[in-house]
Image (cartoon, helix red, strand yellow):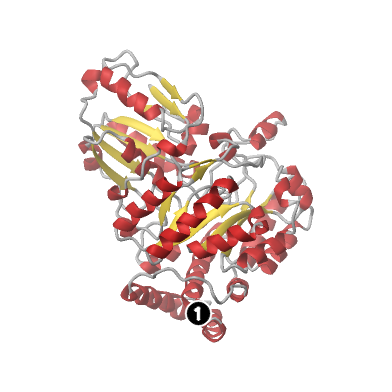
Amino acid sequence: MNLSDTVCITFVTIGKSVETPYFREYPWFMKVLLVYPEFPETYWSFRHAITFEGKRAAFPPLGLMTVSSMLPTDWERRLVDMNVESLWPDDVEWADMVFISAMIVQKDSLEYVVDLCRSMGKKIVVGGPYVSTSCESLPDADHIFVGEAETTLPEFIADLEAGTPKHIYKAAERPSLHETPVPDFSIVEINAYSAMSIQYSRGCPFNCEFCDIIEIYGRVPRTKTNHQMLAELDALNATGWSGLVFIVDDNFIGNKKNVRLLMPDLISWSQANKYPFSFITEASVNLAEDDALLQSMKEAGFRRVFLGIETPAEESLKEAQKGQNTRRNLLESVHWIQSYGIEVMAGFIVGFDSDPEDIFERQMAFIRESAIPLAMVGLLSALPDTQLWRRLEKEGRLIGDSTGNNTDATLNFVPKMNQTVLVDGFKSILKNIYSPKEYYSRALDCLSRFHVDRIEPRSSTIIKDLKAFYKIVMTLGIRDRARREFWKYFYRLVRFHPRDFAHGITLAAMGYHFRQITEKYCA
């Protein structure tokens, strides 16, 4: 599952044939309901951690927020994020048309929303990465928009006004992001989220076999202009938001030339606005080779970066066509990035055909030595329309669709390793790395690798921070059965890392979330 929610939109209008006189069916003034389906409880939901700070979801639906800005200005629109609030029939009844964006992991909730809207006779628009690669799984559809929406959505709206909408809309080429508007931050309840989201680029230059990003967005990274990015930051800052901002790019440094040009402006903006935001993003491991870029990211206020490390087994990296990870020492790369005060969060995978018998022990050892607290370990999953999917299909090894959740201990292909050994080994990794003693040890090790001159972006209100701290201490230090390990961690945090105390407490909350999910999956 990807961290990002991008603006790849596939539209589906259900209930009328193409020959229907749509001009009468669709009044030009529209009431549009934008719906974001619910995520299941996973590692990526962060649900058990964000409740400490009184939040209801980790990130807002950036795709729908961007689509909202692309709709005619006189159309009325509302958003229901089902991760924040329930979707009620009255919400659907209000609308002329319902737009839904979803990733694979939201498939069940998506189907529920579609069924509800269809039962109420509403026009339905479905979008997002899931439908872009899984159109055969959709209900009978009159209008399908495949790919990114910057060029096709305006075309659809014009055809709709003329009463001549086509069955399929697919951009002839991947659009430039220079025309992408500032997301509509006004339609979300910003205080319900732990972080806000913006996007700088789409696409990745690498060729990982299991990745669907390069299939959807291509291998030539496209970026917004510096002016666009600063305009988005200004708009977000105007809402009063302060705190985490997730730059959702699947590889923020995919176009290093443009990123280097962006960083001076981003640093200047952060300094001029007294650091209202701290940034997190995703990048490839070759970030560790670029000291100038790392220094710039530090000065701009980057606090965390997600790396796709996948595995310490070089033979498995080669199998996955992840050669960029074989040309450098992965452990040293992680430590070098950490030395700039940027916490490393990373993804790991087991289940490659080339995995050696001792892969589980090697993964645990690497995670321990790398001091990565938030280590996302998953089983290899064959996502639709990826190179891996096509290879396994040719080999006759596919056994079903992916759930989109690579941590639920399910497989959708026949592995080379004995399946019971693989699943049990996978669970053993989770139990180990998220055991309280092991996790707290990594968190302290991580904090010890930060430089003391790390920039601290502006924090939220003291009252909110104190409330969150109280809830964490009451849960982890009083009610939790692992409270003894928490107080040992707390003592070392205060004694050795007082400057990073807030960060350390946040890591403790995240570890609690991961432990709850691990116990659920490994029960």
Q: Considering depth in this image, is 434 or 246 the residue closer to the camera?
A: 246
Residue 361 horizontal/vertical position (percent): 74, 62
Nearer to me, 374 or 201: 201
Query: Total of numbered circles in the picture?
Result: 1
Q: Name the residue at 36% across, 35% down.
A: 114
Please say if 112 is above or below 449. Answer: above
Give x and y (percent) for residue 320: 71, 43
Q: Which residue is mark 1?
A: 499
**Viewer can see residue 221:** yes
In the foreground, 459 or 394 = 459
Q: Is residue 46 at all visible to an observer of this figure?
A: no
Callout 1 crowding tier (Cα within 10 Å): few <14, some 14–19, many ≥20: some
- Compared across the picture, whether 345 is left or right of 279 comes to right
**Apparent side of residue 479 relative to residue 296 in the rendered image (left or right):** left
Among the 4 quarters of the image, the one containing residue 292: bottom right
Hey, which quadrant is residue 53 in on the image?
Answer: bottom left
Look at label 1 and name its amino acid: Arg
Residue at the spot 69% in from the left edge and 33% down from the top edge: 391
Q: The C terminus lies in which quarter of the figure?
A: bottom right
Percent coordinates x, y for residue 336 in the rendering: 66, 65
Secondary structure found at label 1: helix
